[in-house]
Each structure stands twice: as C-alpha cells, then as structure tokens.
C-alpha cells in the first residue's frame, strides 16, 4: 500500500469570519484527500492583516514548526495563494514542502483531465502558475512535474526553470487551444443555427450535475451513453452534451460543465475560457446545489461566478439534489426545485419547469410543405417536435411547435 503524504493545513482568518474560514479549510482537506494527502492537523490564525514575510505571524510559524516535529509531517498546505517569497521563507523556516490551495487544485485538475483539450488547458494553467514562481521555490518546485502527488498525470515533464523556454511552451499551448476554441465556436454556431435551446448545468464541484444529466438522459435522452459520475471533486472537466426530448415535446440540449470551487486559481479560469464559454451559449442555467451538504457561501459563490461570466441576465433555476436523504426542507432563501437523482422524484416537475422557461414564447403552427420540400421536413424533425403530419393533394400538412426564431425560418410555409 502506497504511503500517504502527511500534511498540516493552515488558514488565516483576516476577514473576521471564522466559520467561513473553517468551512474553507474543511474543503481544503477534501482537496488534499483527492491527491492522496492525509491531513494530520489544521491551524487557523485570526489576524487583521496578512504578514508579508510568512503570510501568517512569525509566532504561529514557530508553533507549526513544533507540530511538524511531533507529528512527522511532510508538508504544510495553505488555504490561500502564497507569493514565491512567502513559499521560500516558509520552507527555510519549517524545512518541509510548502504548497497553497491553488497548486493543489491544479494537481487535481491534472489528475482528472481525460481529453486533449482538458490536458492542454491544465498544462497551460500549470505553466501560468509557475511562471512568476520560477525563482527560488526550492523543495516545492520539485513537485511541479507530475499530474498529481502520487499518480501520473498529463504534466509529467518537469517545468523548465528557464523563463524563455516556459514562455515558449505557454505560447505553444495557447495556439493549440485557440484551434480547439475555433472548432468549438463552429459547433456553437451550428447549435444556434439549429435553434435547439441549450440548458447548462452549473454548480459547485460534486453537487450532482453529472448524476442529474445521466438521469434526465436515461428518462428522455436520445443518447443513453452515461456521463462519468463519481463522488469526488472535479469528476467532470470537459463539457458534455445530451439531446433531451420527452414524448412529443420540443427538444433541448443539456450541457454539463466543470464544477466551481472557491478560491479557484485565476490561471485555471483563463485556461478554461473555451470550456466556460459553453455556459454563455445557454438559454437557461440550472444552478445545482447539493441538498445534503450545501452552504450559503457555495450558493453565493456560484452566483458570483455566473455574474462574473456576464450571465446574470440568463434565466436561472435553482435545483436542490438529494431529496431522498433530507429530513427537513433546505433553508434556502430563494425559490428552488427539490429533486432526487437516485429515486427520480421531482424529475417531471424539473422537466416541465425547463420547458416552461425555454419555450415560453413558442406556439403551435400549421405548415404546408410541397412534396419536393422533403429536405425541409427532415430539417423540421431535427429542429423541433412534429405533432402531426398529414398528406394532402397539395403537399404535406404539418403541425409543429415553433420558437420565434423558427417561426421566421419557416414563415413562407406557415398557413394562415
């Protein structure tokens, strides 16, 4: 059995909110666990300012040094981003490896990346993170090479200490990602051209987005292939999409995106622009919340990310999962739908709520298509739901649901 690294986790409560700080440190423990690191102790220091030399006070550094000797610790992980100088100073004072939350998240992303795009995005984020930290990171710099702490990942080659070489790598990765971004842009254009509404699943990591996508897909999807789901952080890095259609109702595209987490490294946000852009194409956002383990901080953080992406005007539905595990209704101060991915309870209500939002301006129309317009009929079948088709001497009589966009597209064939 592989030996686990042992770590002390450290947080600085400099904003006067101890509970928020404690919650974030608990989250850091889960991040550490994801890369096979055992948390042996946690330290929270309350201070009204950040100390430039060590981030925390020098007295607290001495206290942690004693804990390291007693607990046989391999590393100390801070819950905030440290400067290169702070990492160097802490390494010299504590004589162990020093990491921060941003570095840990990058390692998890490297471990989870499966597709070419995700691997490129993670590699770019790692290099952007390392660029200002090339000088004097000592022990911690040696851990940059692998995709995770105890498992191989896409970033196996150690980052060059030469700044020029690193910048060349960053440029190369950006060019590669630009090509993928262009391809994805064309895909989005085709989706818009087809005018099928897009619904995006958004939420904190491990909230149940992929489970919900699989459940809706199994109930109403045209493609039953399941999206990978597991009770772990960042199980999904790449955008997955499914066409969802119930009975004779109009279809929509459901997309599952990367989960959010507080204090997400800015390098990752920059690198995952093309993935996050999928959310921007959505006609409706489903904000997924873990009903069993939710917190107002996580809900507000996700809402802030949506706002930062410039999508505060996009309609949003709050969906709370794990209804089957709840004894009491969640105390959330806004309207929400309560569902269970396990039992399916609430799924029909959710589907109806989605349809009400994305097709609120749709109407039923009657079309008359000449017999030589068979290609238009085939296009109609992919664009929307055909309620009824009859053949007359004049052509095909078709009854369909049309959005305002589709109305303009098929206007020449609409009967008075």
Image: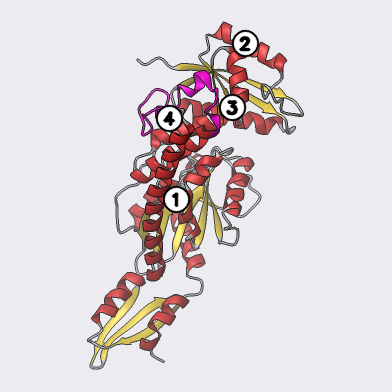
Q: Which residues are magenta?
A: 132-160
Element carrying mark 1:
helix
| Residue 292 lies in the magenta-colored region | no
Mark toward the start of the polypeptide (2 vs 1):
2
Residue 172: tell me if it is visible.
yes
Observer-side mark, 1 or 3, equals 3
Element carrying mark 2:
helix
Q: Are marks 4 and 3 in contact (CB under 8 Å)?
A: no
Give the residue number, with chain letter if any, for mark 2: 65
Give the residue number, with chain letter if any, for mark 1: 275
Residue 237: tell me if it is visible.
no
Give the residue number, with chain letter if any, for mark 3: 84
Task: Please name the colour scheme applied to the rendered image.
Answer: secondary structure
Magenta-drawn stretch, dominant element (helix, strand or loop): loop
Residue 377 image offset from top left, x and y in percent = 28, 78
Q: Nearer the viewer, residue 123 or 395?
A: 123
């Amino acid at each position: 059995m592989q030996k686990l690294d042992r770590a002390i986790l450290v947080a600085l409560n400099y904003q006067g909110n101890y509970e928020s700080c404690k919650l974030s440190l608990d989250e850091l423990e889960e991040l550490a666990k994801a890369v096979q690191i055992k948390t042996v102790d946690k330290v929270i220091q309350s201070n009204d300012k950040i100390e430039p030399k060590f981030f925390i006070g020098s007295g607290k550094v001495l206290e942690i040094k004693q804990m390291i000797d007693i607990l046989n610790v391999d590393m100390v992980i801070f819950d905030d981003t440290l400067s290169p100088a702070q990492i160097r100073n802490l390494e010299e004072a504590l004589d162990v490896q020093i990491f921060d939350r941003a570095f840990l998240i990058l390692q998890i992303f490297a471990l989870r990346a499966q597709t070419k795009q995700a691997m490129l995005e993670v590699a770019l984020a790692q290099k952007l993170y390392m660029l200002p930290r090339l000088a004097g990171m000592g022990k911690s710099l040696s851990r940059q090479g692998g995709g995770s702490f105890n498992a191989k990942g896409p970033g196996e080659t150690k980052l060059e200490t030469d700044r020029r070489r690193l910048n060349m790598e960053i440029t190369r990765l950006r060019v590669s990602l630009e090509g993928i971004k262009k391809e994805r842009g064309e895909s989005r254009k085709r989706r818009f051209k087809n005018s099928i509404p897009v619904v995006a699943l958004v939420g904190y990591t491990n909230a149940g987005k992929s489970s919900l996508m699989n459940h809706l897909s199994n109930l109403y999807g045209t493609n039953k292939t399941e999206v990978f789901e597991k009770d772990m952080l960042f199980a999904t890095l790449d955008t997955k999409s499914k066409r969802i259609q119930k009975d004779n109702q109009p279809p929509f595209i459901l997309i599952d995106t990367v989960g959010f987490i507080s204090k997400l490294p800015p390098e990752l946000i920059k690198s995952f622009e093309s993935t996050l852009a999928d959310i921007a194409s959505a006609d409706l956002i489903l904000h997924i919340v873990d009903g069993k383990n939710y917190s107002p901080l996580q809900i507000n953080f996700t809402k802030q990310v949506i706002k930062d992406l410039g999508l505060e005007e996009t309609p949003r539905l709050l969906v709370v999962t794990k209804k089957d595990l709840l004894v009491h209704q969640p105390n959330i101060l806004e309207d929400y739908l309560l569902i269970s991915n396990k039992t399916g309870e609430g799924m029909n209500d959710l589907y109806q709520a989605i349809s009400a939002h994305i097709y609120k301006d749709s109407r039923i129309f009657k079309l008359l298509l000449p017999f030589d317009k068979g290609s238009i009929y085939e296009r109609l079948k992919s664009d929307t739901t055909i309620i009824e088709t009859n053949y007359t001497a004049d052509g095909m009589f078709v009854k369909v649901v049309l959005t305002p966009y589709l109305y303009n597209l098929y206007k020449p064939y609409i009967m008075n």
